[in-house]
Amino acid sequence: MKNTTLTRRTVLRTAALATTALASPFVRGARAAATVFPKGKMVLAWHTNIAARWLDPQQHDGTASGDNFLMALQDALIKNFREVRYDHPALAERYEFAEDATSATFRLRPGIKFHDGSPVTPEDVKWSYEHYRGAWSEVLHEKTQGVEIIDDRSVRFHFNSPFLDFPILLGTANVCGAGWVVPAKYYEKVGQDGFMQKPIGAGPYKLVSQQPGVKLEFEAFEDYYRPVHVKQFTMVSVPEAATRLAMLERGEADIMYFVPGELIDRVKNNPKLMLAPVVSGNWWLEFPGFQDPKSPFHDKRVRQAISLAIDREAINQAESGGMGVVDGNWINDDVEYYIQWPKWERDVAKAKQLMAEAGYPNGFNVDWITPVPNFYSRGERIVAQLQSIGIRAKLQVMERGVFQKKMEGGLKEWRGVQIIMNATRIGGTWSNWYDSMFKCGGFQARDFFCVTDLDDKFKQYLASYDAEERKNLAEQIQREILENYYFVPVFRHAFVNAIGPRIAATKWQDVFPTYMTAGYPYPWEDIELKEAAATER
Amino acid sequence: MGQFMIRRTLYAVITLFILSLTIFTVVRLTGDPVTLLAEPGARAEDLDRVRAEWGLDRPWPVQYLAFAKNVFTGQLGKSFNYEMPVSTLYFQRLPNSLELALAATLISFIVGIPAGLISAVKVNSGWDSLGKVVALLGLAIPGFWLGLVMILVFSVWLEWLPTSGQGDWRHLIMPAVALGWYFAASLLRLTRSSMLEVLRSEYIKLARLKGLPGYAVIAIHAFKNALIPVLTLAGINLVVMLNAAVIIEVIFAWPGIGRLLYEGIFQRDFPLVQGVVMEAGIMIVVINLIVDILYAYIDPRIRLTK
């Protein structure tokens, strides 16, 4: 993805383009909204239980599950939408980010309403932001001087200092919920608990009923500013994958999330169904304690040899049916300042030579290779492939809670010669990845790596208000990690979903158009049923 | 009698206290629920905020006192995931579990008791062999596997029944059969052995010698007495099905207590797991207490035994 520097000029240019390019579909959309009559019923088979907090953007937990629900029920000022990463105008018809990054002004669309018929006002925007207590709330509140209501449709955020990440944070649905607007008076009246029982939003679907944790019944919101195609929409929690697939085959569900590997062929062999392999989390190998000269991983040549010995294509084929992606970076391509990196070569002979040069002609023993639970087979493949260069390892499997606990414990929990096969998907900006996964003291990095030079550069990045400088530093840090094999990227796996025959789609991307930044098929309002399915009783 | 009741009540309270301590400690040994809630990459500050919100940053004794207070008020705390009182969730799901457990019990009765009866009456015949095979299959085939096969056959291939969820009577058939299958087999075996024992007793021989017709001997004299242990087992089975039909409820997406417990364990939802276990514990302890008191009322020897 092309990275652009955020300046006043680019923002204004985007805004100008937005008012022309984006306005036309919305004019079309407004006309269409009047002529599109929502029809039929669609069912989504959700793969875990449904947590109540996912209906309330005020409690956004900073993870990727909630945005599936927020995108149906709620709406934000700006958001990730189709190919737009974070600044698609949603409730705001346009916004302007000051060149010095000390303020941002949003202009609301005219006539937008919440599901109870009350208008979406700048007061609601201000209240939602000021009362937001979810992920990133401390950072946002600390950096914000105040929220000013300019007129009955405009609101301006003032910052204490340049706040370059503000639009990214505000508009990335799987990172932060501060830009999602809730009806202030209603929320105050019913409180947090009341809101979760009967949430009201401004999204394309209003909640009709809910069975906590089990089922959510929605109905198309007629006053939404874009056309909504399906009248009734049900999200039902079905933890067992085989049951979800049976629902899809039987026509009881139209979309199912998470088809595990053993069921992929069953979907492939059914001509009525369509696989939707959304490329998701990135996987890499890391070497806790490699800074210790006694560690065999201290030598860059050993880390490079490991990279050369891994058959990434085979892993992708076996683990994601070939539907994942083998690329060069350990950071996903949907975040700010990501750098593209060429595919890693595989050359076992060269790897053996490097091992010999590093003083390990006969390899060495690794105490444990530990993959992120529950993806144990991936770890087994790494164990097998490293044998080709004489690295003899055992696989360590852990329950997820135990794994997380050990990760939090830092190096003292990972004594000896260890390789961790780690993975994540974080939205927004590259710095979220570095901060959590590599930085000394980071949430999942603890004291594993502690490359002082890079951490210093990262501090410089955080302190900088110069977008160009930040971009350069970001790229420099990523390059150094990759060139030094501090992390050895493996592949990006596919979060495989499936689509049933009632949905109108010629390819899976028609249903999952926001696949660049999300694993879920929003915008929900755009999904259509086939005519026969829409009119069936 | 008064002393007996006080003593028994005290035992019940001590049992519940030990249960509360055990479940409180055990769930906390399973790990930090906040790290499980967050996908890798969540910010440490956000996780700390959630820990503080859920009261997990407080010392264990303080957390235990809060839990004990919640048990006394009957709310059983607030679920981390559902953000609702656990008691509300429990009683919302209880009728669903009761519906499933009663249907499964009915199926186990319909299959298990007549088959056991026929096996015993026609012992060592072809019917008996068939009964043994049914019992063996019932005990050997896991309910979850049977459930998945039934979904494939009756929902996907034949399209006779809905795959999962709760709705009309058709939704109930497969989960009830999958759940009741094992219990039907155990009832079959027990009915058979109990009937065989009764049929060999002296009073049955006497009844036959008196010239009573075979059906009357079996239906009136033998079956009635053979049914006592069978009904005792059925009662225990019902309590198990009500509170622990975890796998069947998950496979059929049945919104019962078993699934609630599964979700609680899976998500490390401490208040939910504690609450469901305490509710089940209270149910069992109170029923036992009532039965003990009734026994003591009926049979004075019990209350006089120290």
Image: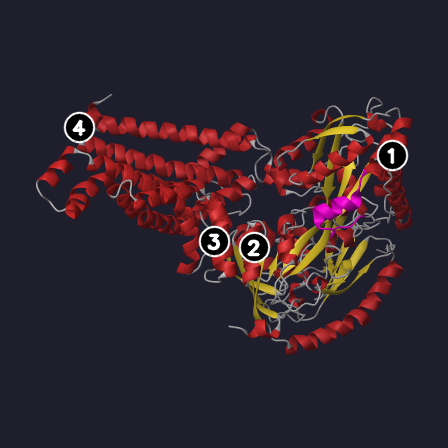
Q: Mark 4 points at which residue?
A: B300
Callout 1 secondary element: helix
Question: Could you say which is closer to the camera, residue B167 or residue A334?
Answer: B167
Q: Are marks 3 and 1 on the same chain?
A: no
Callout 3 secondary element: helix
Q: Which residue is drawn at 29% across and 40% down?
A: B124
C-alpha distance separating marks 2 and 3: 14 Å
Residue A112 location (% of width, % of height)? 66, 68
The amino acid type of the residue labelled 3 equals Met
Q: Which residue is drawn at 41% across and 55% down?
A: B173
Residue B75 appears in the picture as rendered: no
C-alpha distance separating marks 3 and 1: 52 Å
* Residue A351 circle label: 1
Question: Could you say which is closer to the camera, residue B155 or residue A529?
Answer: B155
Q: Name the residue under label 2.
A: A244
Label 1 marks a residue whose chain is A
The amino acid type of the residue labelled 1 equals Ala
Callout 2 secondary element: helix
C-alpha distance separating marks 4 and 1: 85 Å
Q: Mark 3 points at which residue?
A: B150
Q: Identify the mark nearer the N-term, 1 or 2.
A: 2
Residue A216 location (% of width, % of height)? 54, 58
C-alpha distance separating marks 1 and 2: 44 Å
